[in-house]
Image (tube, helix red, strand yellow):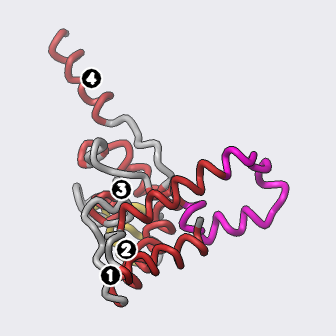
């Protein structure tokens, strides 16, 4: 009985869902990729500690293990199980394969949708009934977070990087 109890505890601990909005993270990932690609095209180096880089994307391992088989079928790359929608596959990954994520090194990019101006976030922003207004203090804190995140992505000693940071800051922060 002790042995099965330990196994049950281990399964519960391993299968606790990741508190990260997967749809928002997919949007944020695309915006971040485009932003970093623009930087690279301009000859600006992206630093390894950049939170927007793929190495820090908490849910990227799960995204890389998803295959769209048909318009109505998705396959789990870990166990080959088939699902009728991406949403069901996401739930499966949360429940059954959460242990494949490295929680201490990853960032939920979906939490940066306000900074990255994800399409869904922008639509919600235009709907005054969808959210409560932010306080000046909250806005200042998010602006500071945004600017700090940008400075952590690029070498501020480089003139082209400083110019890019200013452009991105004006647009996103």
Which sits earlier in the primary sequence, circle 3 or circle 1?
A: 1
Q: Residue 41, percent across and down?
A: 35, 90
Q: CA distance from mark 1 to mark 2?
A: 34 Å
Instruction: Kindly identify which residue carries mark 4.
Output: 8
Q: CA distance from mark 3 to mark 1?
A: 26 Å
Q: Nearer the viewer, residue 100 or 160?
A: 160
Q: Residue 146, percent across and down?
A: 52, 59
Instruction: Kindly identify which residue carries mark 3.
Output: 59
Query: Does dot 4 land on a helix, a strand or a loop?
Result: helix
Say which residue appears at 58% left-offset and 69% top-offset. 172
Query: Does dot 1 land on a helix, a strand or a loop?
Result: loop
Q: Residue 103, percent across and down?
A: 31, 43
Q: CA distance from mark 1 to mark 4?
A: 50 Å
Disc 3 and disc 2 in contact, CB within 8 angstroms: no
Which sits earlier in the primary sequence, circle 2 or circle 4?
A: 4
Q: Nearer the viewer, mark 1 or mark 4?
A: 1
Above or below 119: residue 5: above
Say which residue appears at 26% left-offset and 46% top-offset. 102
Q: Residues within 10 Å of mark 4 (few under 14, many from 20)?
A: few
- The part of the chain drawn in magenta is 113-139
Say which residue appears at 22% left-offset and 57% top-offset. 78
Q: Residue 77, percent across and down?
A: 25, 62
Q: Nearer the viewer, residue 45 or 121?
A: 45
Disc 3 and disc 1 in contact, CB within 8 angstroms: no
Query: Does dot 3 land on a helix, a strand or a loop?
Result: loop
**Residue 82 in view in this figure:** no
Instruction: Kindly identify which residue carries mark 1.
Output: 44
Q: Nearer the viewer, mark 4 or mark 3?
A: 3
Say which residue appears at 43% left-offset and 52% top-offset. 108
Mark drawn on residue 68 = 2
Q: Residues within 10 Å of mark 2 (few under 14, many from 20)?
A: some
Q: Nearer the viewer, residue 34 or 38?
A: 38
């Amino acid at each position: 009985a002790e042995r099965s109890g330990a196994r049950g505890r281990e399964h519960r601990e391993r299968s606790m869902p990741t508190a990260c909005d997967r749809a928002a993270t997919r949007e944020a990932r695309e915006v971040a990729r485009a932003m970093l690609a623009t930087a690279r095209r301009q000859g600006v180096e992206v630093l390894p500690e950049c939170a927007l880089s793929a190495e820090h994307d908490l849910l990227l391992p799960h995204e890389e293990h998803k295959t769209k088989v048909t318009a109505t079928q998705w396959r789990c790359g870990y166990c080959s199980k088939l699902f009728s929608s991406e949403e069901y596959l996401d739930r499966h990954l949360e429940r059954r394969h959460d242990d494949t994520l490295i929680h201490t090194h990853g960032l939920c990019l979906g939490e940066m949708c306000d900074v990255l101006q994800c399409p869904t976030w922008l639509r919600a922003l235009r709907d005054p009934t969808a959210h409560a207004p932010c306080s000046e203090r909250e806005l200042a804190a998010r602006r500071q977070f945004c600017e700090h995140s940008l400075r952590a992505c690029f070498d501020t000693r480089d003139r082209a990087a400083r110019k890019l940071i200013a452009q991105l800051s004006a647009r996103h922060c």
